[in-house]
Amino acid sequence: MPKRLDTSYHKRMIAARMDDPEFRAEYERARREIDQVDSVIRQLDELREAAGLSKAELARHIGRDPSSIRRLFTAESNPELLLVASIAEDLGAEVRVVPRTRVRRGSSGKAERATTAWDARAGAS
Amino acid sequence: MAWDVVYYRASDNSVPTIDFLEGCPTKVAANLLAVLDAVAEAPPPKYSGGGKWEAMHGAMGGYFEVRASGPGREQFRLFCVLENADPTELRRRGLPSPAIVVLTGFRKPWRTKFSERDYRAVRALGDDHQSNVPRWIAE
């Protein structure tokens, strides 16, 4: 039976570094910023799935190259939203994806009326 | 299920990433480690890392980098590979669960590029890591 490695080094290191107030404050700030960006992209992806659209179909709908959509949803590129999230974080706000209406698609795959849209709202908290 | 974050350990028992992090400004280290934790908590193929975790391409295909900026826009990078396989194969490698393996880190002035020599050095660490069964990691 192969030796089972102890993989706790990282968690122990983070715990030790958290004793430094400067590290803790920056780590927590960075996590809030990262979580905002991740939340926006994941919500968009969830909306895409709920609408029954493949990434390629979504790309066609918005006139973009399919690879750009694939990269966006698989963390293979840096979304421009990072700057938005950084600004929102600095302002004590957050970026939200807000569906305006429920998507209804006909047999053609096209939206029959106002489609799900998303807002990037930066509302001061 | 969250993944582990582990650090490649060389045959001389040095851990390049830990040496690198100890030389980073505190805020830079905090940012780099925050990205690793975010990705470990929501691992691929989920979107994660806030745009600071990126898949590399070309000769570096299969590697991932964590990005952070420091004072004077100096750029800091961690280079990683993923350990994701069926449980039997993970056990053979000594790993209890899938993991992000952090190989090493480099820094560079703003608007400069790493050299091919730098990337070769990263790949050499990756090759060494994958040649070890069980894996050699910081414990």
Image (spheres, coloured by chain):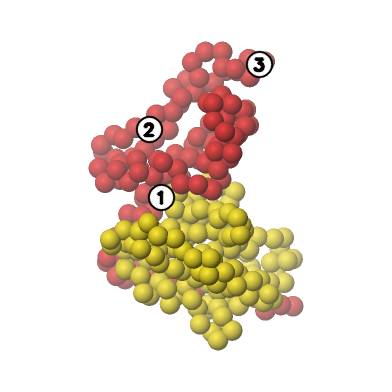
Chain colours: A red, B yellow
The mark that comes first in sequence, 2 or 1, is 1
Q: Residues within 10 Å of mark 2 (few under 14, many from 20)?
A: some
Residue B133: % across, % down:
69, 76
Please indicate whether residue B110 sits to the left or right of residue B129 in the image: left
Q: Indicate the secondary structure of the residue bearing disc 1.
A: helix
Q: Chain of mark 1?
A: A
The mark found on residue A120 in the picture is: 2
The residue depicted at 51 percent of the width and 82 percent of the height is B14
Seen from the viewer's position, the closer of residues A26 and B15 is B15
The mark that comes first in sequence, 3 or 2, is 3
Residue B73: % across, % down:
31, 58
Quarter of the figure with residue A98: top left
Residue A67: % across, % down:
59, 39
Q: Which residue is mark 3?
A: A108
Q: Amino acid at mark 2?
A: Ala
**Label 3 in the same subunit as label 1:** yes
Q: Amino acid at mark 3?
A: Ser
Q: Amino acid at mark 1?
A: Ile
The mark that comes first in sequence, 3 or 1, is 1
Q: CA distance from mark 3 to mark 2?
A: 29 Å
Residue B98: % across, % down:
62, 62
Q: Residues within 10 Å of mark 3 (few under 14, many from 20)?
A: few
Say if mark 3 contacts mark 2, CB within 8 Å. Answer: no
The mark found on residue B138 in the picture is: none
Q: Quadrant of the N terminus of chain A?
A: bottom right
Quarter of the figure with residue B18: bottom left
Q: Indicate the secondary structure of the residue bearing disc 2.
A: loop
Q: Indicate the secondary structure of the residue bearing disc 3.
A: loop
Quarter of the figure with residue B68: bottom left
The residue depicted at 32 percent of the width and 54 percent of the height is A29
The mark found on residue A34 in the picture is: 1
